[in-house]
Image (cartoon, rainbow, N blue to C red):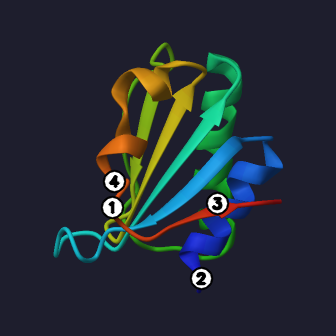
């Protein structure tokens, strides 16, 4: 099962924007990939998170899905152990600067 591909497609299905995939294996032994994506509003951000959960379950994913952030949060985090997904509403992504923090690792922009 290609969990990363399922996650990326789930984000795209709900019109996630600026989807960046970072290979962070050189930085930490606990994590392989970090996905950072943006949305236009809270409702869309929550829909993306729900779609990721739904698509993984439909594909038979049996791993733990841990989440941080509440429905009112402009930053949601989904931890799938080897993959961590960060979902930001609008300018919140720039405020936290994760893209700048991981600027030195191999990254790829996911296009629909």
Q: Are marks 4 and 1 in contact (CB under 8 Å)?
A: yes
Image quarter hosting the N terminus = bottom right
Q: Which residue is mark 4?
A: 102
Label 4 or label 1, whichever lies nearer to me, is: 1
Q: Say which quarter of the image contains residue 108.
A: bottom right
Q: Which residue is mark 1?
A: 104
Distance CA(mark 3)–CA(mark 4): 13 Å
**38 displayed left or right of 76:** right
Distance CA(mark 4)–CA(mark 1): 5 Å
Q: Is residue 29 above or below residue 108?
A: below
Disc 4 secondary structure class: loop
Whole-percent x, y for residue 8 in the image: 66, 61
Q: Is residue 69 above or below residue 54?
A: above
Q: Residue at left 36%, top 63%?
A: 64
For disc 1, the neighbor class at 10 Å (few under 14, some 14 to 19, many from 20) is: few
Label 2 or label 3, whichever lies nearer to me, is: 3
Disc 3 secondary structure class: strand
For disc 3, the neighbor class at 10 Å (few under 14, some 14 to 19, many from 20) is: few
Q: In the current view of this chain or complex, which residue is farthest to the bottom?
A: 1
For disc 4, the neighbor class at 10 Å (few under 14, some 14 to 19, many from 20) is: some
Q: Which residue is mark 2?
A: 2
Distance CA(mark 1)–CA(mark 3): 15 Å
Lower sequence index among marks 2 and 1: 2
Q: Which residue is mark 3?
A: 109
Q: Say which quarter of the image contains residue 45.
A: top right
Lower sequence index among marks 3 and 4: 4
Disc 1 secondary structure class: loop
Q: Residue at left 78%, top 42%?
A: 14
Lower sequence index among marks 1 and 3: 1
């Amino acid at each position: 099962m290609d969990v990363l591909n399922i996650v990326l497609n789930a984000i795209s299905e709900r019109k996630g924007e600026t989807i960046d995939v970072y290979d962070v294996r050189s930085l930490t032994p606990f994590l392989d990939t970090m996905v950072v994506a943006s949305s236009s509003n809270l409702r869309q951000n929550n829909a993306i998170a729900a779609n990721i959960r739904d698509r993984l379950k439909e594909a038979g994913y049996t791993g733990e899905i841990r989440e941080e952030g509440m429905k009112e949060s402009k930053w949601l985090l989904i931890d799938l152990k080897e993959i961590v997904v960060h979902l930001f509403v609008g300018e919140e992504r720039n405020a936290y600067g994760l893209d700048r923090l991981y600027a030195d690792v191999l990254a790829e922009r996911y296009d629909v």
